């Protein structure tokens, strides 16, 4: 594992037949010039854009993930062009960002890249029945489209990978801003994020009748202990668990500190996660693999070097290693 994943990394010496590295990373406004993100003057210079692409390339070459979930993607074609020569012939994205005035981009999308075949791809679209079950409006949808990619892995078979980016904590804009407090806009954002988590949990449950292994990753924009996200961990059929917790199970008695994946000033929070179904829990009878490594790629946050990291990301990458148990 990369030297950029310090402190938290402990590797297993158990011999395995197949090892798979999975990573998730918020790319933070991945948009090629001369286009702008959100405002007309948010445009990278060519030098800044090359630095951003070089940083992403270094991350991939050091970590070498087999499956990579990415958020805040504006330039989809440029991202795929960067990834292909790095060993990712399989790439999926199911949405497009919004473009205003021909060059101002909003609503970035998520993507997934893989070294192994992606056998099926879909954009999650809730049914009327699912929306009714949760008492949601008929036109409700995820604030950012979630991609579901079925990836065929050696020995493990087909795994359903969900890449998400839940609603942020930024207050939802309101029609009558002068009449309503900022707190109401924040509450609306929180409610939306909770609704998204509940809907995703329901959809995974309904769309996985064969108990196929499931992997859910991305920027959750909240801590997993938040009541808003508890529906994701409540499904007893799939028994989704945080990969960090699964890693801890294998190293009982070893003190492991949870390191933030994002910072607001001096305050850090864990917002980025990889969740795994019971197929990856060695205590489950149906287990086919286990988490043998967990680390963060976060040097650009905690000890940045301007020359290398000035146009990197405002999130750490979560990186896990899965070993087959066959």
Image (tube, rainbow, N blue to C red):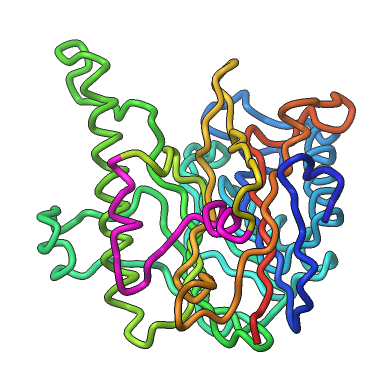
Outermost front residue: 253
Within the magenta stretch, is there residue 236?
A: yes
Task: Tell whether 197 sits left or right of 76.
Answer: left
Viewport quadrant of the N terminus? bottom right
Point out the stretch of residues depicted in magenta.
Answer: 227-250
Q: How many marks?
A: 0
The quadrant of the image that shows the C terminus is bottom right
Q: Position of residue 287 (x, y in %)?
A: 51, 79
Q: Residue at x 39, y 28 (%)?
A: 170
Residue 253, relative to residue 154: is it above or below?
above
| Residue 307: x %, y % from top left | 89, 27
How far from the left and from the top, in percent, is residue 299? 78, 34
Q: Residue furthest top?
A: 178
Q: Is residue 259 magenta?
A: no
Residue reaching furthest to the right: 307
Give above or below for 8 relative to 263: below
Picture quadrant where residue 15 is located: bottom right
Task: Identify whether 209 is placed above or below 20.
Answer: below
Relative depth, front residue between 233 and 151: 233
For the point 70% across and 71% down, which residue is it?
A: 20
Q: Is residue 110 visible?
A: no
Residue shown at the point (54%, 36%) measured from the top left: 104
Residue 255 image offset from top left, x and y in percent: 64, 41
Q: Is residue 165 left or right of residue 11?
A: left
The residue positioned 45% from the left and 76% from the top of the image is 284
Residue 145 seen in this snapshot: yes
């Amino acid at each position: 594992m990369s030297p950029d994943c310090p402190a938290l990394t402990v590797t297993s010496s158990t011999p395995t037949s197949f090892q798979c590295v999975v990573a998730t990373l918020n790319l933070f406004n991945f948009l090629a010039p001369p286009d702008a993100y959100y405002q007309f003057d948010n445009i990278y210079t060519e030098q800044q854009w090359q630095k951003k692409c070089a940083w992403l390339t270094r991350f991939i070459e050091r970590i070498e993930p087999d499956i990579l979930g990415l958020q805040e993607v504006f330039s989809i074609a440029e991202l795929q062009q960067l990834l292909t020569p790095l060993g990712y012939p399989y790439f999926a994205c199911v949405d497009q960002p919004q473009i205003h005035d021909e060059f101002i981009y909003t609503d970035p999308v998520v993507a997934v890249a893989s070294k192994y075949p992606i056998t099926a791809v879909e954009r999650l679209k809730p049914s009327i029945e699912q929306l009714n079950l949760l008492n949601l409006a008929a036109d409700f949808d995820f604030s950012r489209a979630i991609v579901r990619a079925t990836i065929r892995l050696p020995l493990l078979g087909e795994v359903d990978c969900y890449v998400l980016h839940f609603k942020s904590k930024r207050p939802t804009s309101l029609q009558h801003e002068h009449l309503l407090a900022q707190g109401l806009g924040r509450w609306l954002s929180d409610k939306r994020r909770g609704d998204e988590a509940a809907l995703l949990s329901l959809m995974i449950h309904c769309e996985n009748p064969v108990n196929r292994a499931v992997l859910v990753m991305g920027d959750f924009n909240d801590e997993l202990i938040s009541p808003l996200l508890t529906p994701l961990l409540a499904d007893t059929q799939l028994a989704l668990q945080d990969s960090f917790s699964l890693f801890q199970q294998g190293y009982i008695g070893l003190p492991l500190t949870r390191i933030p994946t994002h910072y607001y000033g001096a305050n850090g929070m864990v917002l980025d996660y990889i969740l795994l179904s019971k197929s990856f829990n060695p205590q489950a009878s149906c287990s086919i693999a286990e988490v043998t490594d967990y680390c963060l790629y976060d040097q650009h946050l905690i000890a940045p070097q301007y020359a290398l990291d000035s146009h990197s990301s405002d999130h750490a990458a979560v990186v896990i290693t899965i070993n087959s148990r066959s």
